[in-house]
Image (cartoon, grey):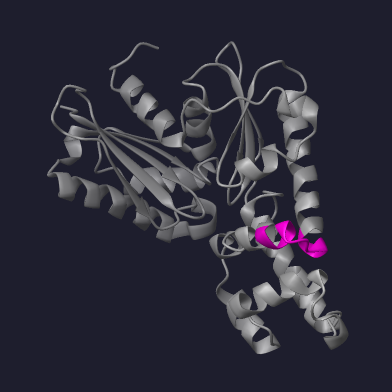
Amino acid sequence: MITHFIAIDGGGTKTALRLTPKDPLTTDQTSEHVFGPSSLTQNGDKAISTIKQAIHTCLHQHQLTNEQVGIVIGVAGAGNTELKSKLEGALSCFPHCKVMTDAYISLIGANHAKPINCIAVGTGTVATQLDHDGQTTLYGGWGFPIGDEGGGAWIGFNAVQYLIESLESKRESTTHKNDQQALLTKTLTPIVGGRRDQLLTWLKSASASNYAQLAPVVINCAEQGCRSSQGILARGTKHIEQLAIKCCKNNNLDIVFLGGLSHYYQHQLPEHWQQRIIKPKGNALDGATLLARKFAGDIDE
């Protein structure tokens, strides 16, 4: 018998897990845990291992059996049926487990399963629309590096490209070393490296998560007047606006922004988009929990 729900939001930067008791009147408390990245596209078998271990760790800590939990997992890369099936096979020991995309659980959580446009900008980027008929449409979300333009990984990738170009062209000469134009290079060098051998070592193991960790650095440099950083973010904003156009231009639904970079981007968009933006009513874990209750028959359709 299901006594608890596990909601999982797995992406390129982290895996968030929430355990919620089925009975709201129980003395058991809702608890949340964070684990390493689990994008099926970026992390492969390691992602599967991370998700499975996260569930086992949670069950062990709370002394629950596999049969007691209704699990909904929203994970980046689950749009690939082969990767999704592989994860489902690895989790077959959990009888009440559903796997879907992280974009879908975000969409459901954003407006509590009511019609909405949802633009998620974190490590990657994806826009989803839930219409009045309950149908969903997906835009973007192709994964890094082929897609996810404007996302954290994309920002970091472009910043490292700039660093390499800068070091090779030596545009930051000693006569301009105090120029704000050089700020991005100065800031990235201690992190990524300032010599070819150092850069090659960093690049060899760099993942989408590693690139995404550079995004706050770029934003900080831009806020200090670094024109190179501002240029990267301006291009990123154009990509996010194109995502908004694809998702939102043919409807009058409200728009919610989710993800670690949502606050930055939503304030960069033209006014006619900002007028439609509302605060999200929930997040991806809320969406996954809502779906877990639905699948368990705990709530109406």
Query: Which residue sits at x=54%, y=36%?
Result: 103
Could you tell me residue 263's position as x and y percent?
Answer: 61, 41
Name which residue lies at 40% across and 58% down: 36
Looking at the picture, does residue 142 appear above or below residue 166?
Answer: above
Q: Nearer the viewer, residue 207 or 283?
A: 283
In reply to whether residue 21 is colored magenta, the answer given is no
Is residue 134 shown to the viewer in this render? Answer: yes
Q: Position of residue 210 (x, y in %)?
A: 56, 65
Quadrant of residue 237 within the rendered picture: top right
Above or below, 91 relative to 50? above
| 269 in relation to 54, above or below | above
Q: How many numbered tags mark residues here?
A: 0
- Residue 141 visible in the current orientation: no
x, y percent for residue 15: 41, 50
**Magenta residues?**
220-229
Indicate whether 287 appears above or below 176: above
Q: Quadrant of the N terminus?
A: top left
Taking 271 as reference, is 276 left or right?
Answer: left
What percent of the width, then of the height, locates residue 125? 64, 44
User: What secondary structure is the magenta-colored segment mainly?
Assistant: helix
The one of 73 and 165 positioned closer to us in this rendering = 165
Position of the C terminus, as image quadrant, is: top left
Q: Is residue 156 left or right of residue 88?
A: right
Q: For this view, does 95 lie left or right of residue 89?
A: left
